[in-house]
C-alpha cells in the first residue's frame, strides 16, 4: 500500500511515510503502547489513500485556498481512506484514526466537526505531524518552510488546529532534534517493527485476498469509468486459468495479477484517463507507461515479484503489435496472455468517456475474431469456455464499493483557510 501511494506525484509522494515517522516519535513521547504506536504509524501512511480519484489537481498543484466545490470533494478523503483500510483485517483501530485525522481542536475540522478531547489522541498526533510534514515540503505556490517557521506555525495554532498537549510535545521534540530529515531506510525499519507489533504471526489467505480487493479498488478509484474492473478481471482470469487446466498455484497467481495488473495507472493523470476525445501522442505514451510503472512497483516487493509480468505484458498482442516490448506468440508469459483477453473483454463491456459499453455477445465475438491475432488461440478458447452464468453473476455484482457519504458539517462553520498547507 505504501508503494501504491508512492506512485502519486507531488503532494502524496512520500508524504505518508514522512508523517508516519514524525507521528511515531510523538506517540513514543506520550508513552503509548507499541500496538498504539503501530496503529498511529499505519494510519499516518494510509491516511490519504482516499484522495485517489478526487480533484487530482488539488494535490498535484496545491493552492493556499481551495475553491468551495473542490474543497467539498477533498473533505471526503478521510472517510474514503477509512473505508478502504477498514476492509483490511486487523486494521479496525487504524481506520478510526484515519477518519478523524483532519479534525481540529476548536471543532472547525472535518469530517465530523469533533473538538477537544473528543478527537482520539492518535488522530491529534497525526494532525500535528501531517501539518509539519506538509509545510516541510515545497509546493507550487510556496517554498518549503524551515524548522523555525514550522515551529512557529505549530505554536501559533495550539488550541486551534492542534491539541495543546500534542502541539507542545511536538515542539519539544523539534527543539531536542528528535524530528529529523526523512530517512527511507529508517522508515523501512519502523515499518517492519510496526508490522510485528500489530499483525499476528500468520496472516490468513483470506486476509491476503482482502488486501488484493482493497488495492484493486484503489486502482479503479483513479478512473470513474473502471469501477470494479480489477475484481472482474481477477475473477475471469481465474476461470480462464482453470479452463486451461493450469496448476492451482498458477490459477491463484492469475487471480492476484488480475487485481493488480493496472497498478501503474495510479501514475497516469486522471485528465488523460478520462479524456473524452482522441489522445495526443504524449498522452498515449503516458497511458502505455502504466505497464512499466506497475511492474516496477511489484518488482520492488519481494512477495509480489512473480506478479510483475502480468502488469508489464498484459497489453502485448499475439501478433507482436502490442506494448511495451512488442512480444509475440509464446514469448508472452501465460499470465499476461490470460489477462490480455480478460482485460479486453471487461474494457469492451464497460462504458468509457469516449464510447458506450458493448454487449456481452459483441465482446465475445470480438474475442473469437481476435484469437490468433490479438489473443493467444488456446487462451481465447479457454476464455470462451467460461460458462454464461459466470458472466451474468459478474455483471450482476456491484461494480464498485458503495460510495462514502460525507459526514454532516455543523451549521454555520465557514470554510477555513488551509494554514497547514495540506
Image: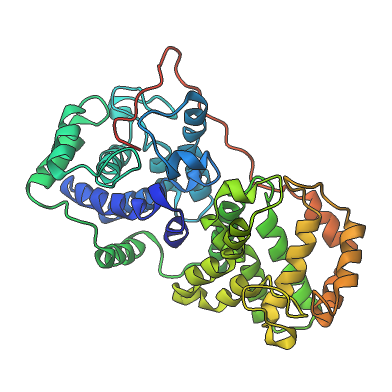
Which residue of the protein is positioned furthest toward the top in this rendering? Answer: 412
Percent across and percent down for residue 52 are 52, 47
93 left or right of 227? left
**Figure check: 313 above or below 97:** below
Q: Residue at x 52, y 44 (%)?
A: 83
Percent across and percent down for residue 186 are 24, 65
29 left or right of 379? left
**Figure check: 123 above or below 24:** above
Which residue of the protein is positioned furthest toward the front in this rendering? Answer: 281
**Figure check: 109 above or below 52:** above
Which residue of the protein is positioned furthest toward the left in this rendering? Answer: 176
Q: Name the image quarter holding the C terminus.
A: top left
Q: Residue at x 29, y 39 (%)?
A: 142
Percent across and percent down for residue 17 are 33, 55
Residue 194, image quadrant: bottom left
Q: Residue at x 86, y 53 (%)?
A: 358
Residue 302, image quadrant: bottom left
Q: Is residue 165 at least partly visible in the picture?
A: no
Q: Residue at x 29, y 46 (%)?
A: 138
251 left or right of 291? right
Q: Is residue 338 at least partly visible in the picture?
A: yes
- Viewer-proximal residue among 50 and 398: 50
**Figure check: 155 above or below 361:** above
Amino acid at each position: 500500500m505504501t508503494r501504491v501511494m508512492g506512485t502519486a506525484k507531488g503532494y502524496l509522494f512520500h508524504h505518508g511515510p514522512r508523517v508516519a515517522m514524525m507521528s511515531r516519535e510523538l506517540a513514543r513521547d506520550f508513552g503509548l503502547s507499541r500496538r498504539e504506536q503501530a496503529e498511529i504509524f499505519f494510519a499516518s501512511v494510509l491516511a490519504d489513500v482516499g484522495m485517489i480519484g478526487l480533484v487530482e489537481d488539488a494535490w498535484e498543484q496545491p493552492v493556499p485556498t481551495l475553491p468551495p466545490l473542490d474543497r467539498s470533494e477533498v473533505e471526503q478523503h478521510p472517510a474514503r481512506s477509512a473505508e478502504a483500510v477498514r476492509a483490511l483485517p486487523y486494521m479496525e483501530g487504524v481506520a478510526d484514526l484515519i477518519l478523524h485525522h483532519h479534525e481540529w481542536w476548536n471543532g472547525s475540522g472535518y469530517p465530523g466537526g469533533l473538538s477537544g478531547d473528543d478527537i482520539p489522541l492518535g488522530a491529534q498526533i497525526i494532525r500535528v505531524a501531517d501539518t509539519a510534514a506538509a509545510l516541510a515540503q515545497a509546493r507550487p505556490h510556496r517554498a518549503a518552510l524551515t524548522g523555525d517557521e514550522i515551529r512557529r506555525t505549530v505554536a501559533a495554532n495550539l488550541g486551534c488546529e492542534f491539541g495543546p498537549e500534542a502541539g507542545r510535545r511536538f515542539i519539544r521534540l523539534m527543539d531536542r532534534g528528535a524530528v529529523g530529515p526523512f530517512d527511507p531506510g529508517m522508515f523501512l525499519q519502523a515499518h517492519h517493527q510496526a508490522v510485528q507489533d500489530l499483525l499476528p504471526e500468520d496472516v490468513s489467505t483470506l486476509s491476503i485476498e482482502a488486501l488484493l480487493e482493497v488495492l484493486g479498488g484503489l486502482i479503479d478509484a483513479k478512473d470513474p469509468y473502471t469501477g470494479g474492473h480489477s475484481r472482474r478481471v481477477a475473477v475471469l482470469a481465474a476461470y480462464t486459468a482453470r479452463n486451461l487446466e493450469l496448476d492451482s498455484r498458477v490459477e491463484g497467481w492469475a487471480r492476484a495479477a488480475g487485481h493488480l495488473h493496472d497498478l501503474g495507472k495510479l501514475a497516469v493523470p486522471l485528465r488523460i484517463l478520462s479524456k473524452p476525445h482522441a489522445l495526443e501522442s504524449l498522452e498515449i505514451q503516458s497511458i502505455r507507461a502504466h505497464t512499466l510503472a506497475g511492474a516496477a512497483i511489484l518488482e520492488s516487493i519481494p512477495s509480489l515479484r512473480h506478479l510483475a509480468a502480468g502488469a508489464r505484458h498484459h497489453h502485448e498482442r499475439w501478433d507482436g503489435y502490442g506494448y511495451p516490448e512488442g512480444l509475440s506468440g509464446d514469448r508472452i508469459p501465460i499470465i499476461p496472455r490470460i489477462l490480455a483477453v480478460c482485460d479486453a473483454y471487461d474494457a469492451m463491456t464497460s462504458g468509457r468517456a469516449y464510447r458506450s459499453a458493448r454487449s456481452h455477445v459483441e465482446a465475445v465475438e470480438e474475442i473469437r475474431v481476435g484469437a490468433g491475432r490479438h489473443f493467444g488461440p488456446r487462451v481465447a478458447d479457454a476464455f470462451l469456455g467460461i460458462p454464461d452464468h459466470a458472466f451474468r453473476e459478474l455483471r450482476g455484482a456491484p461494480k464498485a464499493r458503495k460510495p462514502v457519504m460525507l459526514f454532516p458539517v455543523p451549521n454555520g462553520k465557514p470554510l477555513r483557510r488551509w494554514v497547514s498547507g495540506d
